[in-house]
Amino acid sequence: MKKEEPSDVFILFLVTSSPVNHERRQLIRRTYGRNSSWPFDKRGKIKTLFILGVTDKSIQEVIDDEAYRYGDIVQEDFTDSYHNLTRKTVAAFKWANRYCRHANFVMKLDDDVMLHQKRLLELLQDQPAVNFSAGEVLVNTPVVRKAKSKDGKWYLSEEYYPSQTYPPYMNGHIYLLSSDLVEAVYQTAVQTPLFPWEDVFVGICLQKLRVKLTPISSFLRVNYPRFVVDDDKKMVAKMKHFFAVADISLYLMLELMWRAFRVETL
């Protein structure tokens, strides 16, 4: 990925994507990841990048083709896995810090998230691009201490992390930061021992920076059981209350959420 030339970028979308999720990347390129989908005008353009780690040779051939065709792949030298999500996020912030500091805002999001475009535009209307954060803020989240519980994959021993709760942090599916905070988080991250959970790690960095996170009501809805229903009208009615919905199918991303809540552009 070549260096971005100086220009007015209103939002830089950094999408953490699994190497195998070619169809999701294609959908994003057709929807919110396309500059012509946004009516920013003089406020600047949008830029979208997909952040990946290293994968096997057969999948890499597809990724190389994508990188050649679209020029929007950033691939770092670590194994692409759940346990390396923190490295992936740090890699995303590194690229933003080195090559796109002129962006007003940076949004980190997963490739199974769809935006409520109208709500996001309302949120950013006249928003100063300094010391700004937006996301679902989790406060006093308890540390999982039982390895064999239903949440056992998030288990941490007291020896590894003595505190019983995590610092306030934004749900890692999607959050928005002004570029000054992205730069500050990256500079802090490279001096901080990596933590297994990437969203908590960013929260630790923001706590070191003494940044107070302000919760935004209904910022994110994750597809937990009983959220998705087999009725399109009811599903749209559920989705309209949130800035973003995560862990949803390609059909829900495109046919319902994007087409229901996008803005018309020329």
Image (spheres, rainbow, N blue to C red):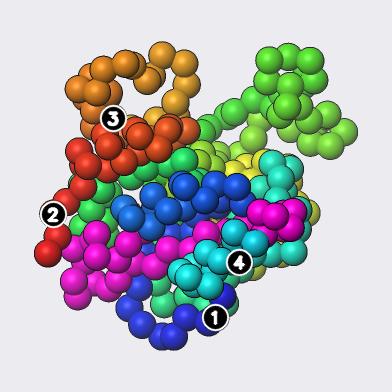
Question: In the image, which disc is placed on residue 239?
Answer: 3
**Magenta stretch, residue numbers:** 32-60
Q: Secondary structure at mark 4?
A: helix
Query: Which one is in front in this view, the residue at disc 3 or the one at disc 4?
Result: 4
Q: CA distance from mark 1 to mark 4?
A: 14 Å
**Residue identifier under label 2:** 264
**Residue identifier under label 4:** 64
**Residue identifier under label 1:** 2
Given residues 48 and 146, the one toward you in this image is 48
The quarter of the picture where the C terminus appears is bottom left
Question: Which amino acid type is shown beneath numbered disc 1?
Answer: Lys
Residue displayed at 41% across by 85% down: 6
Q: Residue furthest bottom?
A: 5
Question: Which amino acid type is shown beneath numbered disc 3?
Answer: Met
* Chain-order first, disc 3 or disc 1: 1
* Chain-order first, disc 2 or disc 3: 3
Question: Which amino acid type is shown beneath numbered disc 4?
Answer: Asp
- Classify mark 2: residues with Cα within 10 Å, few (<14), some (14-19) or many (20+): few
Q: CA distance from mark 3 to mark 1?
A: 37 Å
Q: Position of residue 206 (x, y in %)?
A: 57, 53
